[in-house]
């Protein structure tokens, strides 16, 4: 059984930085596509970033240059490093794994990031 | 405004058949596989249909997907109360180099 356990959500001031973590079990993070998807409460899904098994990374336009996805194979963990946060980044952030891209097979529980002064 | 267009709401009575559409363009639905997700409020989304028409293990065969050109559809037959949820379509967009989602359809079982 695949489990993705997330942590790191917090209340952060505009302009601040935050790193989210997603610890995987049942899969190895370097064998799957690992993505971050966010959702403003009450709104729809928005894809944020993906790391391919080979290490290539892609980002959505609104976060390009500010967010960075990485992984630690030894800890079987994927990270989302977020900088220059703004109110518009406030959302529940989900990590998700894919075998067949871009279908998200398994999802973490979500973690809330609130950007507010 | 979402790249993929879904109706904001749909409804049906128990036992009925309901379809949800997902309209896109040549750079997304027209050239890439479409996936469908079910999200019960307060929980993470769940993959319902992948590769346009395929159901993951454990998804009832009441759920089916189809695609023609730039229009994808999700059909639910034999509607049940537990099907009340938000449904999203998603795919890759070759122009944006990004995953795009529809705005979501809230399904109400009357």
Image (cartoon, coloured by chain):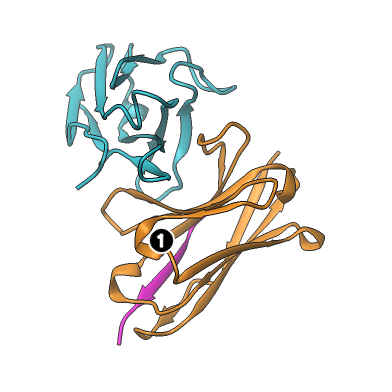
Nearer to me, B29 or A87 = B29
Toward the right, the furthest residue is A74
Query: Compared with residue B86, is residue A85 higher up or lower down, i.e. above or below?
Result: below
B71 with respect to A32 (left or right): left
Residue on which disc 1 sits? A92
Q: Indicate yes or no whether the magenta region holds residue B65.
A: no
Residue A42 can be seen, yes or no: yes
Query: Compared with residue B40, is residue A94 higher up or lower down, i.e. above or below?
Result: below
Nearer to me, B97 or B64 = B97
Query: In the image, residue B35 lies at what x, y percent?
Result: 43, 29
Please give the range of residues in magenta: A108-117
Q: Indicate yes or no whether the magenta region holds residue A110.
A: yes
Query: In the image, residue B64 lies at what x, y percent?
Result: 40, 15
The residue located at (51%, 36%) in the rendering is: A102
Query: Compared with residue A93, is residue A85 higher up or lower down, i.e. above or below?
Result: below
Query: In the image, residue A54 lies at what x, y percent?
Result: 70, 47
B39 with respect to A102 (left or right): left
The residue located at (43%, 66%) in the rendering is: A112
Query: In the image, residue A86 lies at what x, y percent?
Result: 32, 76
Q: Chain of mark 1?
A: A
User: Which of the image's four quarters has the C terminus of chain B?
Assistant: top left
Query: Compared with residue B70, is residue B39 higher up or lower down, i.e. above or below?
Result: below
The residue located at (51%, 19%) in the rendering is: B55
Q: Residues within 10 Å of mark 1 (few under 14, many from 20)?
A: some
**Image quarter of residue A113:** bottom left
Residue B110 can be seen, yes or no: no
* Chain A color in figure: orange
Supply the letter of whichever chain is cyan: B
Q: Judging from the image, what secondary structure is the residue with disc 1 in?
A: strand
């Amino acid at each position: 059984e695949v489990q993705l356990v997330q942590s790191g959500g917090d209340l952060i001031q505009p302009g601040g930085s935050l790193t989210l973590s997603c610890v995987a079990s049942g899969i190895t993070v370097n064998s799957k596509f690992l993505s971050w998807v966010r959702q403003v409460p009450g709104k729809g899904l928005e894809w944020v970033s993906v790391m391919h098994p080979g290490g290539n990374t892609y980002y959505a336009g609104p976060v390009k240059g500010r967010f960075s996805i990485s992984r630690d194979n030894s800890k079987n963990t994927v990270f989302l490093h977020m900088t220059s946060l703004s109110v518009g980044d406030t959302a529940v952030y989900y990590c998700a794994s894919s075998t067949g891209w871009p279908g998200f097979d398994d999802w973490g529980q979500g973690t809330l990031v609130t950007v507010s002064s | 405004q979402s790249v993929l267009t879904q109706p904001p709401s749909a409804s049906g009575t128990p036992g009925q058949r309901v379809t949800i559409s997902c309209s896109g363009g040549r750079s997304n639905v027209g050239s890439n596989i479409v996936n469908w997700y079910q999200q019960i409020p307060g929980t993470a989304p769940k993959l319902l249909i992948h590769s346009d028409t395929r159901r993951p293990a454990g998804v009832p065969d009441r759920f089916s997907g189809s695609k023609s050109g730039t229009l994808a559809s999700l059909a639910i037959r034999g509607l049940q109360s537990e099907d009340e949820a938000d449904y999203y379509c998603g795919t890759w967009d070759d122009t944006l180099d990004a995953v795009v989602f529809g705005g979501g359809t809230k399904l109400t079982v009357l």
